[in-house]
Image (cartoon, coloured by chain):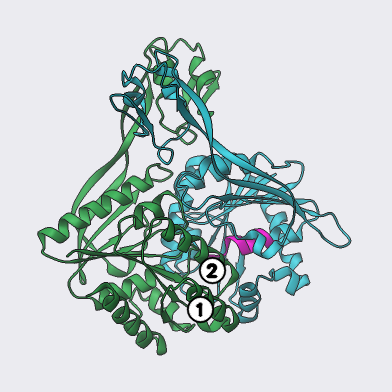
Chain colours: A green, B cyan
Amino acid sequence: MLKELTIVSGKGGTGKTTVTAAFASLVPEKIMTDCDVDAADLHLILQPEILREEKFIGGRMPQMDKSLCTDCGLCQQECRFAAIDYSEERGYHINPFACDNCGLCAFVCPEGAITMVDAVNGAWYISRTPYGKMVHAKLGIGEDNSGKLVTLVRQQAKKLAEEENLSLIINDGPPGIGCPVTAAITGASMVLVVTEPTIAGIHDLERVCELCRHFQLPVLVCINKYSINLVNTQKIRQYCQEREIPVVGEIPFEPQVNQALVARKSVVDFPCGQVSRVVRQLVEEVLARLGK
Amino acid sequence: MIITVASGKGGTGKTTIATNLALSLPAAQYIDCDVEEPNGNLFLRARIDRRLEVGKPLPEIDHQRCTFCGECARACEFNALAVLKKKVMVFPELCHGCGVCSYVCPEKAVGEGEKIIGVAEVGVVPREGEDNLGFVQGILNVGEPMSPPLIKRVKQFAEPEKIVIQDAPPGTSCPVIQTINGSDFCLLVTEPTPFGLNDLELAVGVVRQLGVPFGVIINRSDSGDQEVREYCRREQIPVLLEMPMNRDLAFAYSKGIPYVREVPAAREQFRRLLADIEKELRRC
């Protein structure tokens, strides 16, 4: 049966991608994805060679035909997102950064000067990497619909896994608890939360665990850089114990991890002292819990 | 003046810079716009004076008037409505509160209620011997996917006569745009690694498109490589501050103690940062 593991963190910069890259290196038969579509980083380590590239049409956007516009200003009156600007030289026009693409202006316009057209919000890719195939994406700068793009990446990964007869997908998730995170975890077999023993790390861990509980998803926790604050590490252990969340790995702080990153290597393919060994154990533990 | 502290990549030190900068300035206000994971108050420990629920508009169907014609569902760009034979279903998570459904309904059967998506909190961080630091934060409800309406609301508490420091969420999509839009200056915090550089380039793309003047702060500047500096040189982007890695300060951070509280002399560095921002703004 197809299993899907999503790696998230709540707080950014706790080591999601570092841990994901180790899974990529150590687990043989799987599809990798990067679901952090607005700041994707996994490709920096996996160095994918793109096999297929597709446009991502996330929705529609309004387009104004100024030759039909009479500058009546109704669109500006009705828009709830303050997305219609006015200037002497341009008249009324759409500010794409404020626009929510709801299409109200197109209904409102008495001249039919505004129509809804397909919006290209980014691109998605299927690539070959030294660690197997990968599905990833790039959201256009400042574009909407990141949740939809995440969903698309996961759908494509599932299709690819079926075609290649693979039974495991590993998703590198985005930070936060909003729309792209929800899209990255819903329906996953298991969520691995990578946290750090800082009060911000703990605060965000709690919120992302709550989100997982909201969607009734099994959660595992890994404490990265655990040695920077042992008191906080103990707090995380206790929080997890109270909620019956298994802590499946505790990775020590090690400056060499940064050097591995600079060398664009996974921590299991670069001498990182203790870290390499602990991360190997972590991967084995997670696979066992996934039934792999 | 509104200064937004942003970064493509998470965990580069946005909150560290934003809180320390705010604490170093005499008449300032801190606004946490990272409503998904608001962390500023873990460091600032503000006294909250006001707390209000923030909602987004949500359609309410008058089933007596509704003829189930399906116009509303066809018009909705977000698939937030489904019209069945005898019932209209509204999906609150998908709704953007744009009002298209009530506008197009020929029977005037779509009214509007409100769905609470989070809270905004307003208060002050008491300071001895000087003005209190103004404080605002938004906290998005867990399970609520849409943060922009809450970000918009917390931004309305800005007091522009002060130096307003906005702490942005990570990334480059709608919540980040919602935060940066309308700022006078943007500080992009990065780290000297391939990840830091990749995400900095994305963030630069955002602020350039929005037309907001900006500068870069390199955190953990004594680690990693030279690529970020070379990129900034090539692109003629001012590097306004470099902060070396310091284990004692990292430890203080992990406990929630701001840098300038641990080392008060460091406030000078952040005041200089503001002076440099003002210089940049005069140049543009």
When asked about the image quadrant of residue A250, the answer is bottom left
Amino acid type, callout 1: Arg
Instruction: Please report the residue visible at 53 percent of the width from the left and 50 percent of the height from the top.
Output: B141
Instruction: Write the residue at 44% across / 82% down.
Output: A251
Question: Residue B213 at x, y = what percent?
Answer: 58, 46
Chain for mark 1?
Answer: A
Point out residue A267 in the picture as x, y percentages from the top left corner: 36, 80
**Which residue in the protein does label 2 denote?**
A201
Residue B207 visible in the picture: no
Towards the viewer: A144 or A283: A283
Q: Which residue in the protein does label 1 denote?
A: A237
Badge 2 amino acid:
Gly
The number of discs equals 2
Give the distance between the C-alpha atoms of the residues marked 1 and 2, in whole angstroms: 13 Å
> Is residue B14 a member of the stretch shown in magenta?
yes
Which residue is pictured at 50% across the width and 14% down the height?
A74
Q: Secondary structure at mark 1?
A: helix
Q: Nearer the viewer, mark 1 or mark 2?
A: 1
Magenta: main secondary structure equals: helix
Q: Earlier in the sequence, mark 1 or mark 2?
A: 2
For the N terminus of chain A, the quadrant is bottom left
The magenta region covers: B12-20
